[in-house]
Amino acid sequence: MSPEWIDVGYLLCAMCFVFALRLMNHPLSARKGDWVSMVGMVFALGATFLMFQNVASINMMLILGAVALGAIIGAGSGRKVAMTAMPQMVALLNGLGGGAVALVALYEFLEAGAAFADKPPVQSITTLLSVIIGSISFSGSMIAFAKLQELMTGRPISFPGMKAFNGLLVAGSLALVVLIFAVPATFATPMFFLLLMAVSLVLGITGTMGIGGADMPVIISLLNSFTGCAAGLAGFVLMNTALLIGGALVGASGLILTLEMCKGMNRSLANVMFAGVGSAVAGSGQSAFAGRQPKSYSPDDAAISLANASNVVIVPGYGMAVAQAQHQVKEMCSKLQARGIDVKYAVHPVAGRMPGHMNVLLAEADVPYDQLYELETINPLFSETDVVLVIGANDVVNPAARYDKSSPIFGMPILDVDKARLVLVSKRSMGAGFAGVDNELFVMDNTRMVFGNAKTTIQAISSALENY
């Protein structure tokens, strides 16, 4: 096959990837973006296979078998995984991508042997960067997966001198890179390379285990960016255009997403990585609400309040996702709207465990997109709202974020639900959120707790509405 046709295939692949990213900018076109990106991947695989005309038949069969097996496993797991488990699935798949890049770099290094020292500097440096970044992304993503899957505690794990230890690992990695270039073509060089891979794996573990579960989506996004960068570097190593373009797009978009999430929490990336938010349950030291007891409502009481309101704002959170209550919420809101009550949904940018988590859940229940309001738009309207119904959200509605400098969420933009005339909170208990801090909203004068599983509670409120 002519090399020109391979280039055409890669060009079509790149066009599909860029167009897919454009479509994913809006919830209504995001599904089309998924399909376009899949078409782009087909072009990338097709063009790459055209390069393998001299590969032995048995090897080609093995490659095709691996591609088919991966496609079957990916499609099957993607269909079965629950929305609440999507972040850990992203972490797992991202880690496998990083590990694959590290193994490609290892193979290229071992195959080159003594000739590695004679490679162009761009290729040799990108090979070493690929193994470092790919290994960090692999082990870090596995820790993130274990935390989100609750295979290990979601709280930050640290030990004395941890930051210094991580600094030594970084310094050790740089020293090993220098040694590989300084003593090329010796029996020790492969040992240095394997040691570099091992140090990078440890750095990924110790760098991620010190981060709390609340910040894990940010770290997953950052590790995803790392994997993209590593894949782009592998594109240099293998001289593969599709890998280079795809890696660059993933690396850049992952970094932008990471910074946007940090902006949504009003925190720097360094603060997310090193502050250890969620390491201990802490109260709001300056709160004037300490010692107060919450007031509770039954689902019937909540239904009466909602039925007599003129306007209602729904605030979905992780509790709604866990209970899979989005369909019950939509049904309840439809009943309110049938009474002429204005209903809006307020979506915090970091609600849930991944960006856009609430948007996806509400879209799944066919909630019209024009009823969804972002934080900046809805906050000025809370003071004119009769009833706010918070469903399983916690840190994103905690008023202490506005003034309590001792709180780990101080400065984070929140939904100002406490300014509404009445706040109903559907929650299973008074337990703290991911940040590990108490929420004074729950004991404020205008708040009523409706305890119970979100799905059961919303269903009960919805049924009770028919009586009032």
Image: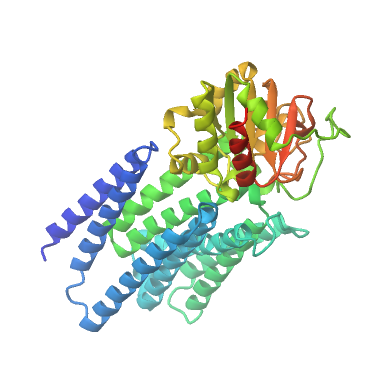
Q: Between 372 and 325, which is closer to the camera in this rendering?
A: 325
Q: Between 343 and 335, which is closer to the camera in this rendering?
A: 335
**What residue sits 49% from the left and 31% below the top?**
334
Q: Viewed as shown, does residue 279 lie left or right of 258?
A: right
Question: In the displayed structure, would residue 55 be above or below residue 461?
Answer: below
Residue 440 image-quadrant placement:
top right
User: Looking at the picture, how far across and down is residue 54, in whole percent?
Assistant: 18, 76
**What residue sits 43% from the left and 39% below the top?**
366
Task: Return the residue found at the far right.
Answer: 291
Give the position of the N terminus as an image quadrant: bottom left
**What residue sits 69% from the left and 28% below the top?**
423
Task: Return the residue found at the far left.
Answer: 2
* Snapshot colouring: rainbow
User: Looking at the picture, how far across and down is residue 151, in whole percent?
Assistant: 64, 65
Residue 271 image-quadrant placement:
top right
Q: Viewed as shown, does residue 97 lie left or right of 31?
A: right
Residue 77 image-quadrant placement:
bottom left
The tally of labels here is 0
User: Looking at the picture, how far across and down is residue 369, in whole percent?
Assistant: 43, 32
Q: Viewed as shown, does residue 294 lie left or right of 369?
A: right
Question: In the displayed structure, would residue 111 be above or below residue 239?
Answer: below
